[in-house]
Amino acid sequence: MFTRSIDDVEKVEWGGGTSQRVLTAKDDMGFAVAHTVVRAGTESALQYRNHLEACYCIGGSGYVETADRSTRYEITPGVIYVLDEHDAHYLGAEDEDLILVSVFNPAINGDEKHTLTEGGFSAY
């Protein structure tokens, strides 16, 4: 058994906000957990080709949208969104920061960073 505080974990800048990876592959749990902040006024095109991801909102508000922009889901505290097919998606926060608990399976290493470019989905 162990504990870890986000105060003891580096903030990783990923382009649209920050991620504090509080549980990673080195912890040998089979999944990873991150405290993710999506900055107000940002939208990022993302995809996880090697991991499934679920994000539970604990603060703020924002949205997740399908890659073809046909479906948009509003994200507020108490809502989880699940990327169960390595879905390319847009993640955004408009008027306030969106704060998420992100769970990855299999676990991320913790040093991954998105490369956000126009016209493409950043993936790892």
Image (cartoon, grey):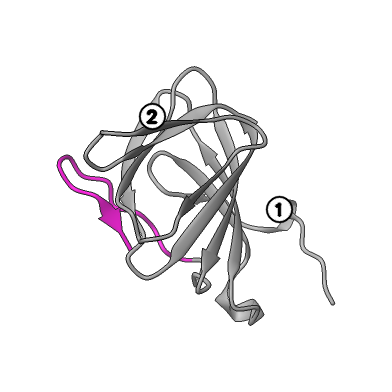
Image-quadrant location for residue 59: top right
Q: Check the image and report above or below for 45 versus 95.
A: below
How far from the left and from the top, in percent, is residue 49? Answer: 32, 65
- Label of residue 78 in the image: none
Cα distance between the residues tagged 1 and 2: 23 Å
Q: Is residue 13 left or right of residue 47?
A: right
Q: Dividing the image into 4 quarters, which one contains the N terminus?
A: bottom right
| Residue that appears at 49% across and 17% down | 95
Nearer mark to the viewer, of 1 and 2 = 2
Residue 52 lies left or right of residue 70; in this view the side is: right
In the displayed structure, 65 sits above or below 97; it is below
Which of these two is toward me, 1 or 104? 104
Identity of the residue drawn at 47% across and 25% down:
40
Q: Residue furthest left?
A: 119
Residue 2: say if magenta: no
Q: Residue at x 29, y 51 (%)?
A: 88
Tag 2: amino acid: Thr
Q: Position of residue 68 (x, y in %)?
A: 21, 39
Quarter of the figure that contains the C terminus: bottom left
- The residue range painted magenta reads 111-124
Q: Dot 2 surroundings within 10 Å: few (below 14), some, or many (20 or more)?
A: some
Contact flag, marks 1 and 2 (Cβ < 8 Å): no
Q: Which numbered marker is on residue 42? A: 2
The residue positioned farthest toward the top in the image shown: 95
The residue identified by callout 1 is 6
